[in-house]
Image (cartoon, grey):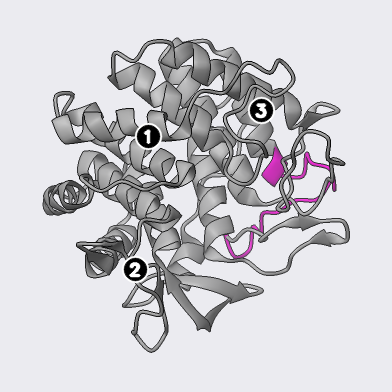
Amino acid sequence: MTRYPEPSFAHVLRLSDDTGLLEHAHGATPSRENGYCVDDVARGLVVISREPRPATNVVHLAERYLAFLAHAQTSDGFHNRLGFDRRWHDAPDTGDWWGRAIWGLGTAASSASVGWMRREAFVRFERAAHQRSPWPRAMAFAGLGAAEVLSVDPDHDQARQLLADALTTIGPPGDRPAWPWPEDRLTYANACLAEVFLAAAQHLDYPGASETGLRMLSWLLETQTRDGHLSPTPAGGWGPGEPRLRFDQQPIEAAALADACARALALTGDRSWIDQLGLAIRWFLGDNDGKLELVDHETGGCSDGLGPAGCSENQGAESTLALVSTLQHGRRHSPT
């Protein structure tokens, strides 16, 4: 049986302070000048809530992250960027961070290891779930949070409507055989769009959701596999008719694929999805276009990206949480 590294929260702890989770790092040293963002704090709440037996210091991080999201929440959505001076540097809105906040709150409401956190996260989820965003990814992230709530409360009307509206905002993948995707270009965290269809197949009576999600995910994996290893869409994106660049590749894309493959496995029971999940895990471990490992086993952090000259030396929150999230799936679904 293949044994992947255990997920480590060592660098997540290093990046966290009494306010939240610092967004960037210089190497493994937290960068205070860049402050915090709801995007990453919400990601942190998701991965900690997924932990079956989190250590006490990790639970305390989740408590801090929940308080951070509560502070960011307003009647107009969520702020995203908090400076190290503890002042918000933006107006509240319903961008991608709003969707990630709902995802974090929904996951904590369903799975946090502490009862009061589950209750508080549920209250915060309900305060946000009546809002809508015009952006497909924001709605996809929010829809995944709604699916978490539905996993413990299948009749929650607000969550059911939010998940259904996420699919409507994303739209159908179209009938172009060479481009069965709902957007004109692949950008980042692409697999979340397929995953939310799979979540709808689990929790809603939504016609064709399973077939659509599986078709989208299969095509995305085929498109992003080269010579037997994962070759994710680079940060600049890619669309039909454009030259396909290899770099720079980012951990968030591999993590989104891992999430979607784990969802497909749960939905179908088809164990071939474990092999697809393994592509995402092994990308972090060096089975990639650069043949370089992105994991820093000394710090527990992850390189921010894979470029033509090698791996970024910086180990920020987004990349490290992407690594932790993906290794959580590896621990649960180790291939034989």
Which sits earlier in the primary sequence, circle 1 or circle 3?
A: 1
The answer to which image quadrant residue 305 occupies is bottom right
Q: Is residue 284 left or right of residue 57?
A: right
Report which residue position mark 2 lands on.
79
Residue wearing tag 3: 220
Q: Residue 319 versus residue 212: which sits nearer the camera?
A: 212
Instruction: Find residue 26 and report its horizontal and vertical position in percent.
Output: 64, 77
Q: Is residue 240 visible?
A: yes
Residue 307 coordinates in the image, percent (x, y) = 81, 57
* Observer-nearest of 231 and 330: 231
**For the C terminus, which image quadrant?**
top right
Q: Which residues are magenta?
A: 283-300
Q: Residue at x 36, y 23 (%)?
A: 200
Q: CA distance from mark 2 to mark 1?
A: 21 Å
- The foreground one among 247 and 12 is 247
Residue at the far bottom: name it.
85
Tell me whether the residue at label 3 lies in contact with that at label 2, contact meaning CB atoms closer than 8 angstroms: no
Of the image marks 2 and 1, the number of the one nearer the N terminus: 2
Q: CA distance from mark 1 to mark 3?
A: 19 Å
Residue at point 74% right, 42% down? 238
Residue marked by disc 1? 166
Q: CA distance from mark 3 to mark 2?
A: 32 Å
Specify few, some or many for label 2: CA neighbours under 10 Å numbering under 14, 14-19, or 20 or more: many
Residue 255, quarter of the rendered image: top right
Pointer 1 and pointer 3: residues touching (CB < 8 Å)? no
Q: Which mark is residue 217?
A: none
Measured from the top left, where is residue 133 in percent x and y? 36, 48
Q: Residues within 10 Å of mark 1 (few under 14, many from 20)?
A: many
Name which of mark 3 and mark 2 comes first in the sequence.
2
Residue 306 screen position, x and y as percent: 76, 54
